[in-house]
Amino acid sequence: MKRFVITMVCMLCFGMMSYGQWHEPKRVTQKFFPDPDVEIDVPAFRKNSGYTSYKEMTRFIEDLVDKYPELLHNEIVGETQKGRSIPLVTVRKGDDVNKIRLFYFARIHGDEPAGTESLLFLIKQLVEKPELQYLLDKVSFYIMPMVNVDGAQAFGRYTANRIDLNRDQSKLQTPEAKMLHQVVNRIVPHVSVDFHEYQPVRADFRKLSSDVLATPWDVMFLYSGNPNVPQVLRDAVDNIFIPAAEEILDRHQLTHHPYYSSTSSLGQVSLPVGGTSPRSTSNAMALKNTISLLMETRGIKLGATSLKRRTWAGYLLAETFAKTAYERESEIRSIIAKSIADETDIAVRFTAKTVSDVPLSFIDLTKNELVSIPVDMRLSAESKPTLVRPLPEAYYILPQAHEAVDVLRQMGVEVSELTHSETVEVEAFGVRTYRESASPVGGVYPVNVTTEQTIKRVEFPAGSFRVDMKQRNKRVATVLLEPESANGFVNYRVVDVNLGEEMPMYRKLKTKSINRKH
Ligand SMILES: [Zn+2]
């Protein structure tokens, strides 16, 4: 009977989950997620409830800047759609030309508050803790504790125009996403870390067990699974940054796992592990030759439950990544140089490896204990390319596709404009099949195409565009311009194409590739 009542109570909580805040049973929090015995001096913990508000954050930063003007600087880098200023805080000692530049940002999603608290605490620790000052000899910090200020004020995921900022990194439909890339293009960070929170109870989990299941990890790591991110960068995350993070979390009895979400089709649940899409920051930043990670603490729909533990976990990660950057400074420089020089073929399409019946830990909220449930997983880190093309010498784009050029430039890709008409032998794409998705993303119905290619001479009029591949951000351009790319320009309808017609963008092949074809 008792079990039945508990189950019913949990089911009720679970039911509420999809409508608003979910209350984790107290005994679960007490058993698995006790608050750490540390003092975190940021506004959220100076009051009895809630999170640090935008106003409190602004005041907190200004007070610290007044106190430590030689180390701290606060700059407004843009405005939200509702006219709120978006701050970028730098913590650095003198000139940072020869330092490792770390870019930390949080609150891409307004309802994931812990990242803001973690980064505010980091700023304070960096200026106040003598034992951390050595970091500034080799490392400069660029910190945006609250990117989506409008979302944070409304405590909702989206920006004011209802766009998910972490699905807008290849389209830049929001001023906030444009601003984020402007900042990155200017800083050119060596390491970029985006602090998020994940939702521990998911509707899909109901199909895995008759009991109510919750994800148990304090932290999940999402790193770039897009195969167009040079291997050397992905290895740096796997072999340098993640092991350091795991070690510190283990030392503090905080649990961790590679990031997964869930999908279900015909009642069958599958957990995608990692992510490959250029529309999310972990890949978008990595495609710019930055060592890029995305952290998820256990927080969405939890309200302020465990907020101190979540904040502490995010802080420990931010501090550890900085220490790692300090210790591995010269190696990081050489990794990034290799990444920029990488000329590997483009993986236009790829599929994740699937594995079945992998035992995975969950908290059974009814029994208040860990259980192991077999799940199917799709491992994006082990994606296999299904359509590969060599890097071209350049892409040519007709004037009509100028919107694509605007986005490329905002992403930091150099695009030149032809002042005279130019006849070039190129690879042209004809649209062979065209399929529109049934559900919209950010207000548009994505398009999937297959193409056929022909080599031909095309006269490009003055005002056409050329994107040379001899540039730092070439991988951003290839991922967005190849017509079959998931979340690329054709898929997201930045460039409109029609069945049977030739596309307005072309590939100028390297001489070697042309010869191979003949
Ligand atoms: Zn998020």
Image: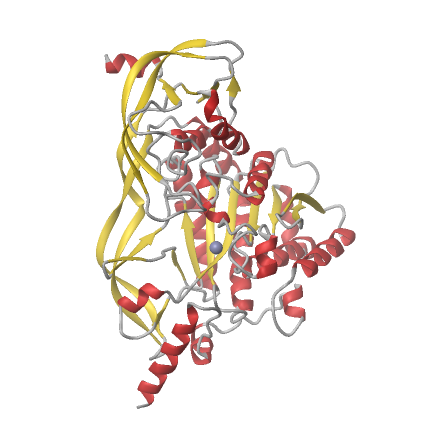
Instruction: Report x, y in % for residue 460.
Output: 44, 13
**Colour treatment of the image:** secondary structure
Query: 468 and 425: which one is in front?
Result: 425
Residue 332, placed above or below residue 163: above
Name the residue located 46 percent from the left edge and 23 percent from the top edge.
Answer: 400
In the drawing, does residue 326 fall left or right of residue 17? right
Q: Quadrant of residue 495?
A: top left
Query: Camera-side residue: 407 or 138?
Result: 407
Residue 216 percent across, percent down from the top left:
39, 67
Q: Relative to residue 123, is residue 486 depicted above or below?
A: above
Q: Residue furthest left?
A: 356
216 relative position to 67: left or right = left
* Residue 466 pos. (x, y %): 47, 19
- Residue 24 lies, in percent from the top left, at 45, 74
- At horizontal 40% and vertical 28% (from top left) the residue drawn is 342
Total marks shown come to: 0
Q: Left or right: 463 with respect to 345?
A: right
Q: Quadrant of residue 1?
A: bottom left
Q: Residue at (54%, 12%) from the top-left corner?
A: 419
Query: Is 119 in front, or is 253?
Result: 119
Q: Is residue 86 above or below residue 57?
A: above
Which residue reaches farthest bottom?
1
The C terminus is located in which quarter?
Answer: top left
